[in-house]
Amino acid sequence: MKKNILFSICFAASLLVSCGGAATSSTETAESRYRVGVCDWMILQRQQPAAFVLASRFGAEGICLDMGPLGDNPRFQSVLMDSMRRQVFFDEQEKYGQAIASIGLTGFYAQPFGLRPEFEELVMQGIETAQAMDVKILFLPLGIFSNPKDHPELRDEVVRRLRIVGDRAAAAGRVIAVETFLPAADELDFLKEIGSPGIKISVNFGRIVANGLDVVSELRTLGRENIAQIHCTNEDGVWLEHDRAVDLPAIRAALDEMEWSGWLLVERSRDATRPTEVGYNFPPNIAYVKTVFGASLHKEF
């Protein structure tokens, strides 16, 4: 496995802060605290090494790499489980100076985490992949069938399951970033019920806006220690720079004050008139996020 030593050191350091929510040191500038990535499935490169090519071309610093399809299968249909095929991803990652922000278990968007009997094996598949690829964060959306906001009847079972996989993740030195659909105050209660150091929150600005809540207030309520990563995105309509519901300068000021550090993942916020044109939508969104957050433009690898 080809490794760039300096890249690994820099990236591991940034993820350690992100996963743990630790404050930055006095010598670390605000500009070095944020990194901007993109989701491979949203740039139409799900489980494709070419995702690194496009991410680099669009100005991103890394990708959330998806585990692949799930459906009714007992395991993710993932090329990442094969060491030889993983090497292709490593080669492209190094070639284009990209990082892997997180591993996405996005099959759970449309599959019920709270009901699937093999939930632990599926999440372990992701944890093992994260270990093999030296990635600290796994993204687990509770989706339309298991999120506690819309399915309170599954809450106890989802809590039980997240406690199990969270402890497995923590034992492996990983963090599972869960997307819940809940307001921040309820997410704090949810995390307290789970009680596992391996479970934190994946914040999605679009979910907050859809709940009719203020993004800055929700971030402050949730707190630095509980945020593993941020989907810096809204639903499709307009680009982020034109979106009045997402005040990125105010959000950046709040995150600076909180001393949070980590990945800002651009997912949607596509122009509704041209939603399928990734080369049209993602470069301006990524550029705007990097402009507001001062995300590192240098290549430390």
Image (cartoon, rainbow, N blue to C red):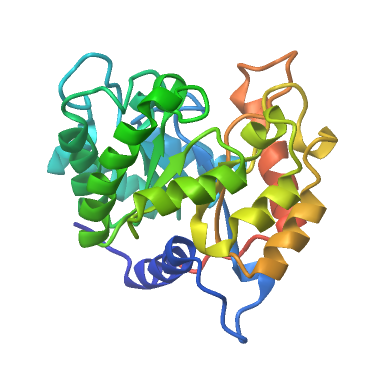
17 relative to 113, above or below: below
- The one nearer the camera, 161 or 55, is 161
Q: Quadrant of residue 19?
A: bottom left
Residue drawn 21% across the image and 52% down it: 168
- The one nearer the camera, 238 or 228, is 228
Quick one: which residue is furthest to the bottom in this view?
26
81 relative to 26, above or below: above
- The one nearer the camera, 94 or 64, is 64
Is 40 left or right of 265, judged from the image as shown? left
83 relative to 261, above or below: above
Q: Quadrant of residue 75?
A: top left
Residue drawn 45% across the image and 55% down it: 97
Instruction: Kindly tell me whether residue 281 is visible in this rendering.
Output: yes
Q: Quadrant of residue 129?
A: top left
Is 181 left or right of 77, judged from the image as shown? right
Q: Give the total of numbered labels.
A: 0
Residue drawn 78% across the image and 26% down it: 238
Instruction: Kindly tell me whether residue 59 is visible in this rendering.
Output: no
| Residue 103: x %, y % from top left | 35, 43
Tell me the quarter of the image containing the N terminus: bottom left
Is 211 left or right of 165, judged from the image as shown? right
| Residue 219: x %, y % from top left | 66, 53
Tell me the quarter of the image containing the C terminus: bottom left
| Residue 128: x %, y % from top left | 18, 47
| Residue 256: x %, y % from top left | 70, 67
